[in-house]
């Protein structure tokens, strides 16, 4: 697989890789693998959420709004 970046993007990647003490190829590969892992975890969480909702295990929108509001205040 080949991925093409603009010269500016390559320059940015080079700076990041240098700062991280690695090369661009390793940096990009690690980033892509992290994306795949995050995507897999997200899909599992969505499936769990759908299963919980199917079982009737959910909270109403008003309660969620209240929880978010409390989180934002803390």
Image (tube, grey):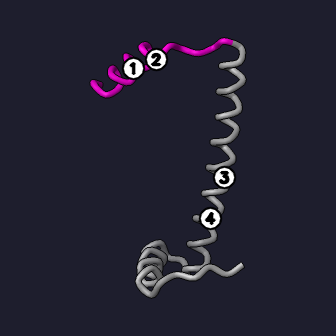
**Main secondary structure type of the part rendered in magenta:** helix
> SS at mark 3?
helix
Q: Say which quadrant the N terminus sits in.
A: bottom right
The mark closer to the camera, 4 or 2, is 2
Real-space CA distance between mark 4 and mark 2, rounded to the nearest whole angstrom? 35 Å
Seen at 45% across and 79% down, the residue is 9
Magenta span? 56-74
Say if mark 1 contacts mark 2, CB within 8 Å.
Answer: yes
Residue to which mark 3 is pinned:
37
> Residue 70, position in %: x, y?
33, 20
The mark closer to the camera, 1 or 3, is 1
> SS at mark 1?
helix
The circle drawn on residue 61 is 2
> Residue 59, position in %: x, y?
53, 14
Q: Earlier in the sequence, mark 4 or mark 2?
A: 4
> Residue 20, position in %: x, y?
47, 72
The circle drawn on residue 32 is 4
Real-space CA distance between mark 1 and mark 3, rounded to the nearest whole angstrom? 29 Å
Real-space CA distance between mark 3 and mark 2, rounded to the nearest whole angstrom? 30 Å
The mark closer to the camera, 4 or 1, is 1
């Amino acid at each position: 697989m080949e991925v093409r970046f603009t010269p500016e993007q390559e320059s940015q990647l080079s700076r990041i890789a240098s700062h991280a003490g690695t090369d661009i190829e390793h940096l990009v590969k690690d980033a892509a693998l992290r994306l795949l892992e995050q995507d897999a975890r997200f899909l599992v969480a969505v499936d769990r959420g759908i299963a919980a909702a199917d079982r009737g295990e959910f909270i109403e929108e008003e309660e969620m709004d209240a929880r978010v509001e409390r989180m934002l205040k803390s």
